[in-house]
Image (cartoon, rainbow, N blue to C red):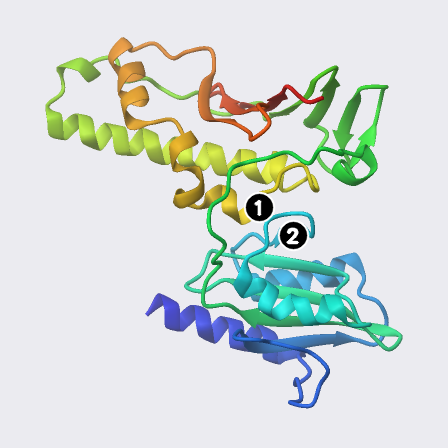
Amino acid sequence: MMKFFSAILLFLAVAVCAAPVKKTAPYTAGSAKVVGAVESKAAFSGDRLFAVLDSVGGAGTWMEWDVNGIKDPSLMDVLDPMLKGANKPEMVWVVTERSKPLVAVLLPKGSGEVILFYELSSLNAKPEPLSINPVLSPDVVLRDYRQISETEYVHRDKENLKVKLTPRGMRFTYEKKGEEPLRMESDYVTKTFAEKQSILRDYEDYFKYEYSLMLRAFVQSTRSIFNWQAWHWYMPEWNAKFLMSRRELDAILVRGVAPSMFTLFKAKTVRGETVEFRCNGNGFWELEVIGLE
């Protein structure tokens, strides 16, 4: 029922302001399904652009496709002919919180623009080792940040989202005051096996949300740092061996005392850099990249 309801909402959202895509239009779909288009006689304003995306994407989060990242064959089936043609995409976004991934492609059209929406069967790139772009330009990577000192940047829309460049790395921080601190189970060791499993699932859900918050804050606010696309960071087949394990979480709960920071994700890249996501369970999150040349 929810899938049917979501499909109806998508149809209505696109149909309200969509221009039909003619079969003879110079746009390609490959194996994807074209679900609609929205045209503008002039370039989309920022407000209207995101209003259109939000109306179609619903509660999902649109993630920007990185031309320098790993290419999902299903997505490139749509994009490759455009990228090779004269009418190249200006921006591409993907939303995954639905039964099938949805893609939005912003293209020039005459003196205006058009957003085409495609539904993919899946995002099907095979997992690859995490790597960092060997050339990181602040003008590209930190496009949504403003520089406040030689080594410090602040997000243009979120003053509490910051990044500090170090001699061999970078450290992102995000702070939200007034968060309710994470409470530790003081009597965890006395619980039955079934009770412990239930408690572990609750904590795993909590840290899963914390991890997704950090991805939105740190990964999705930057460009071309990593080879993984934004959505790859959420996929178990990509991230499972780097996330905090149930055994590690169980050991923390047995001690009954929260560490100063919880390490939710830690990976070594192909060139040996360390990438680590941490939170304190009390409104502070950080991403640290160490070992850059």
Q: Amino acid at mark 1?
A: Ala
* CB under 8 Å between discs 2 and 1: yes
- Lateral position of residue 239 relative to residue 43, left or right: left
Q: Where residue 198 appears, x then y in whole percent?
A: 21, 32
Q: Answer with mark 2 or mark 1, whichever residue precedes in sequence.
A: 2
Q: Secondary structure at mark 1?
A: helix
Q: Which mark is residue 230?
A: 1
Q: Where residue 274 appears, x then y in whole percent?
A: 56, 22
Q: Is residue 288 above or below residue 76?
A: above
Q: Where residue 186 appears, x then y in whole percent?
A: 25, 13
Q: Which mark is residue 66?
A: none
Q: Nearer the viewer, residue 282 or 28?
A: 28
What is the tally of numbered marks visible in this picture? Answer: 2
Q: Is residue 105 above or below residue 248?
A: below
Q: CA distance from mark 2 to mark 1?
A: 7 Å
**Which residue is drawn at the image coordinates 84% and 73% (left, top)?**
112
Q: Secondary structure at mark 2?
A: strand
**Where does the C terminus fall, quadrant-wise?**
top right
Q: Amino acid at mark 2?
A: Glu
Furthest toward the left, the residue is 192
Q: Where residue 240 appears, x then y in whole percent?
A: 38, 37
Q: Nearer the viewer, residue 61 or 26?
A: 26
- What residue is shown with label 2? 64
Q: Residues within 10 Å of mark 2 (few under 14, many from 20)?
A: many
- Lateral position of residue 36 relative to residue 128, left or right: right
